[in-house]
Image (tube, helix red, strand yellow):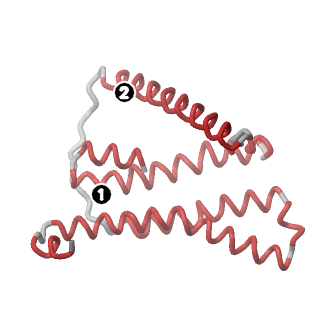
Amino acid sequence: MDGFYERTPEIRPSRKNFSRLGWGLTALLLVPVAIQLLLLLVMGVMGPALLGDLWFSMALSTGSLYLVGYPLAWFLLRRLPEAEVEEGPMPSGMLLRMLFIALAVLYLTNYVTVILTDVIGNLRGSPVANPLESMSDYPLSYNLLVTCILAPIAEEGLFRGVVLRRLRLYGERFALLTSALV
């Protein structure tokens, strides 16, 4: 396989860019989990009383993701080449069509998720817990901070601001679909 890439040098930069993209997104997923596990191990030995504390749990999960994971991913991805795209105003009916398409996709994926969750629960013999239901245990101010401020800013900044602009080198549709999936 390496012989193929040596014969076609135009593929080499794309391969390097996609590798960097993969490493950046892997860092976004794995580094916060590694930090959480490490701190949980240390706290389990040194201060087990904090392990059951709701505020410690919230600070650990939010801090590791938004203070370490997202900045690290941004740092790794910002050096990728960026496509220059001229953006104009959106045609008048396009926003309404996009809204209906987005809502249809939202409901469709929700139904698929509910069906898959039921199938998995039936195979296991017990219902699958919904992680969003555990958010009701957290204070409203924390939920608002995370879901209305931190998550949208971090997601739009990283996935639309960095990933989408870098993937546009490979075509507009590819960039939109890939960044949405990621």
Say what amino acid the circle numbered 1 marks: Arg
Circle 2 Cα neighbour tier, 10 Å, few/some/many (<14 / 14–19 / ≥20): few
- The image shows residue 177 at horizontal and vertical percentages of 34, 43
- The image shows residue 11 at horizontal and vertical percentages of 17, 66
Q: Which mark is residue 98?
A: 2
Residue at 58% x, 31% y is 115
Examine the image and state in which quarter residue 61 appears.
bottom right
Circle 1 Cα neighbour tier, 10 Å, few/some/many (<14 / 14–19 / ≥20): many
Q: Which mark is residue 63?
A: none
Q: Nearer the viewer, residue 89 or 44?
A: 44
Circle 1: element type: helix
- The image shows residue 29 at horizontal and vertical percentages of 53, 62
Q: Nearer the viewer, residue 171 or 88?
A: 171
In the figure, is residue 12 to the left or right of 176?
left
Per the image, the residue denoted by label 1 is 166
Circle 2: element type: helix
